[in-house]
Amino acid sequence: MGYDFRTNYIFIIGDSGWGRTGFPRHAVAWKDGCGEGDPLYDACFQIDSDGRPDDNQATKALLPANLLFGPLSKNLYRFCLFKRGTCDPVPNDERMRRQLGKSFLGERRFTSPRFLSLLKQEFDFDSWDDDKELDNATKTISLSDLLTQYSVFAGWGYGLPQESENEYFAAILQVLLRRPAKNPRKLVSINLYECRPTASPSDFVLQLLAQFHKKGVKRRVDKSLGDVTFVEPYQTSVLFKHRKFVALVRSVGKRPFSTLEMAKAIEKYFVATSS
């Protein structure tokens, strides 16, 4: 559904209370034709179903489960969620079935010209450094090398990294860091990508930006970190590209914290790998 809207008061999973936010788009599990008269399931947040969703003085929490999307004239999903902007079903642009099995963040590609145009405008896509002079004579990136060479990763536990490749990427690396190793309060998801010559790192960064459901991601002007860099508030997520490499570092645990220093270490690793 979308595109580009502000919400009434909702209680987002992982947050400490009710609040308003904005979504460039939002995806749910939707039955039948994914239209106004069809029921949906949304595990991302609770809505306020007391008939006054723009007032948080009194709330009636409801987790949308088999709830009709509905018109704005009825106390259903859209009425409770939507404050202003455009929040319409867009099944022709967005509808898909989730595939079972292993996957990686960014594997799903957004193709809606309208949505991609909104993203390019919001993030000033035309000002990004182009990818015409990519160095193809670099070593392949390795998570084991990264995690053992830089002190910012010392003391973090992690499971078996996932490594793969496909027609677009020479390397797709994923790992989840945890601290402490048992009963961790801090978790960090690291996703690294090495683009093949036939793929555009800039286009892929735009695809990753499309994965952020909440608004609030901003471009960070920092010559010491990437050719182009984006951060969430308090640097809990950092997304950047360096030549043909793309990195996304996210704090995903119960205790959010800045991942900026980890991102800088990854940038140093990309530079060393490219030299």
Image (cartoon, grey):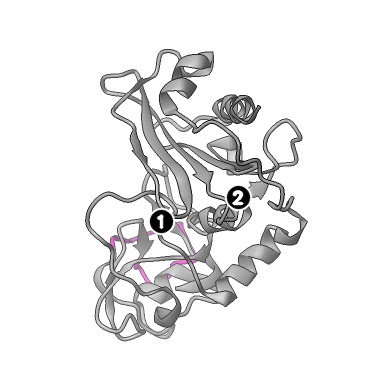
- Residue 31's disc is none
Residue at the (42%, 44%) spot, across then down? 15
Determine whether the residue tagged by mark 1 lies in a helix, strand or loop: loop
Q: Distance between the residues labelled 2 and 1?
A: 20 Å
Q: Which of marks 2 and 1 is nearer the N terminus?
A: 1
Camera-side mark, 2 or 1: 1
> Looking at the picture, does residue 58 appear above or below residue 150?
below
> Residue 217 bears which disc, if any?
2
Q: Which mark is residue 107?
A: 1
Query: What residue do we see at 46% from left, 44% from top?
Result: 170
Question: At 59% from the left edge and 31% from the top edge, which residue is drawn?
Answer: 270
Q: Is the magenta stretch mostly helix, strand or loop?
A: loop
**Of residues 61 and 128, the one drawn nearer to the viewer in this rendering:** 128
As displayed, is residue 231 above or below residue 224? Answer: below
Q: Residue furthest front?
A: 137
Image location of residue 33, percent across then percent down: 30, 84
Residue segment shown in magenta: 49-63
Q: What residue type is labelled 1?
A: Glu
Q: How far across and down, in percent of the image, does residue 275 sit? A: 66, 27
State whether residue 3 appears in this view. yes
| 106 vs 159: above or below | below
Residue 253 visible to the viewer: no
Label 2 residue SS: loop
Q: Exactly how many numbered labels are in the figure? A: 2
